[in-house]
Image (spheres, grey):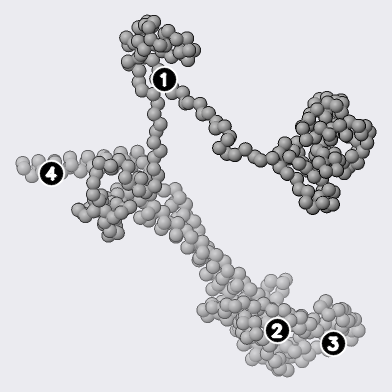
Amino acid sequence: MADRKRSKQSKEEIAKLFDLPERKSKIATLLKQDGQAYCICRSSDSSRFMIGCDACEEWYHGDCINISEKEAKYIKQYFCSRCQIEDPSLQTRFRAAPAADERKPRKRKPKETKEAPKCGQCSGCLAPNCGRCDVCTDLDYNDKKLRCIQRTCTGAVGGRTKRKRRDSSPEGMLSSGTEHLTGPRQCYGPNCTKGARQHSKYCSDACGMKLASSRIYQVLPQRLQEWSLSPCSAEEANKRSLEQIRSQQIAVQATLLQLDKRHKELDMLLDRAKSYVPNAPEPEEEDDSSIYCITCGHEIHTRTAIRHMEKCFNKYESQSSFGSVFKTRIDGNVMFCDYYNSSNRTYCKRLRVLCPEHCKDPKVLDTDVCGCPLVTNVFSLTGEFCRAPKKSCVKHYVWDKIRRAEIDLERVRQWLKMDELIEQERQVRNALMSRAGVLGLMLHSTYNHEVMEKLCAGRQVLPTATFQKNISLHK
């Protein structure tokens, strides 16, 4: 609404708003230039705040030249940028600001003191106005709601006083309440008469340790007795979990013994096969079928497919590395390759049986027997073994290598399981030890009413028993 009223004002009314002595000629010029464009925006809008140049008498909008109406009050002579470029001696002049001493100081209102509440029972509260004092005779005092001098309350409690802030620093805490004392504070240590150190309760660290140990000896026996009488559900749960962990450890150890037994049985089968002579090889049927290798993709004959795929797998397997900076340390078992690579400074972590890069297979002779145990219905052993030459036996190709790898893989799984169980046992034992430790017992301050009743009853029974014993001795 204010903008609309301002836009409806005439040029005469707008000019009167800036009616200053040094600008009357500019106002007259503005009134003559009806509909003429001015300012850097070249518009005829005169509804906004404007300021005129004292040299060229051109008018400018304040928001176009970044001068507000408040700032213009302190300008005595204004020169536009165009006039300053033509004549550098022209500079905008400002009015002198009033000095700090000339400024009127603010009057602070006096703080009104709150009167204490009246008791309403004393002689001052019940007395009438005297009619002679200034409060009763002057009307100005009546406006301020002041009391008559005769009606002064004598039983009122004093007004509120500000509380002093408590000093939270160590010096303030030590000095609070001890202003009447002089000299250093005495040491808190048992049987110590020396003065305490500054900002401390003890004269030395030894006195503090002596007091702490004496308090432990006083409190700890009672806490131990409370702990033994009060059952702890967490401790019982830890004991049950510890029993389960031990049973699992026993099962893992039994599995490892079973795997060692299977490994020895495999060695016995191979030793037995060495004592036999291989049978004559059976005549092979002519077969021209071929398949594609799953590793390299080449077409190969079916008779040489298994050997070709084994070589391709070993070739690509040797190109990848499985290393670790730590060497395997398992007593009595050499399952991993552990070949040290000096360039990478790592140990090979493949199984020794399956490592094609560092552990080569032994050379197979023509006299070697296959030795693979024969079965019926897949799982039933017949007691016989394959007596075909190991070099030409395709049915049981590298069967001993595969069996050893299965046994070693199962060993690795069991050893990893054993490590997890050992870590679980360590955590449970730490929980048991920390729960019944000295620190835990000292911090355990739960008041068990049933336990305390038992302790009190036990203390009462002991004196009566000793009293009866003394009476029987006197008799």
- Residues at marks 1 and 4, CA–CA distance in whole angstroms: 77 Å
Q: Determine the secondary structure under disc 1.
A: loop
Would you say 422 lies left or right of 207 here? right
Q: Which residue is mark 3?
A: 284
- Residues at marks 1 and 2, CA–CA distance in whole angstroms: 103 Å
In the rendered structure, which disc, 2 or 4, sits on the residue that comes first in sequence?
2
Q: What's the amino acid at mark 3? A: Glu
User: Which residue is pictured at 85% across the width and 43% down the height?
Assistant: 56
- Residues at marks 3 and 1, CA–CA distance in whole angstroms: 126 Å
| Quarter assignment of residue 355 | bottom right
Q: Are marks 1 and 4 in contact (CB under 8 Å)?
A: no
Q: What's the amino acid at mark 4? A: Lys
User: Which residue is pictured at 82% across the width and 41% down the height?
Assistant: 53
Up/down of 310 relative to 15, above or below: below
Direction right: furthest residue: 35
In the rendered structure, which disc, 3 or 2, sits on the residue that comes first in sequence?
3
Would you say 269 lies left or right of 236 here? right
Q: Which mark is residue 115?
A: 1
- Residues at marks 2 and 4, CA–CA distance in whole angstroms: 88 Å
Q: Determine the secondary structure under disc 4.
A: helix
**Image quadrant where one finds the N terminus:** top right
Q: Nearer the viewer, mark 3 or mark 2?
A: 2
Up/down of 124 relative to 294, above or below: above
Q: Which residue is mark 4?
A: 469
Q: What's the amino acid at mark 1? A: Glu
In the rendered structure, which disc, 3 or 1, sits on the residue that comes first in sequence?
1
Q: Nearer the viewer, mark 1 or mark 2?
A: 1
In the rendered structure, which disc, 1 or 4, sits on the residue that comes first in sequence?
1
Q: Determine the secondary structure under disc 3.
A: loop
Place of residue 43 in the rendered image (x, y in percent of width and height, measured from the top left): 91, 38
Q: Nearer the viewer, mark 1 or mark 4?
A: 1
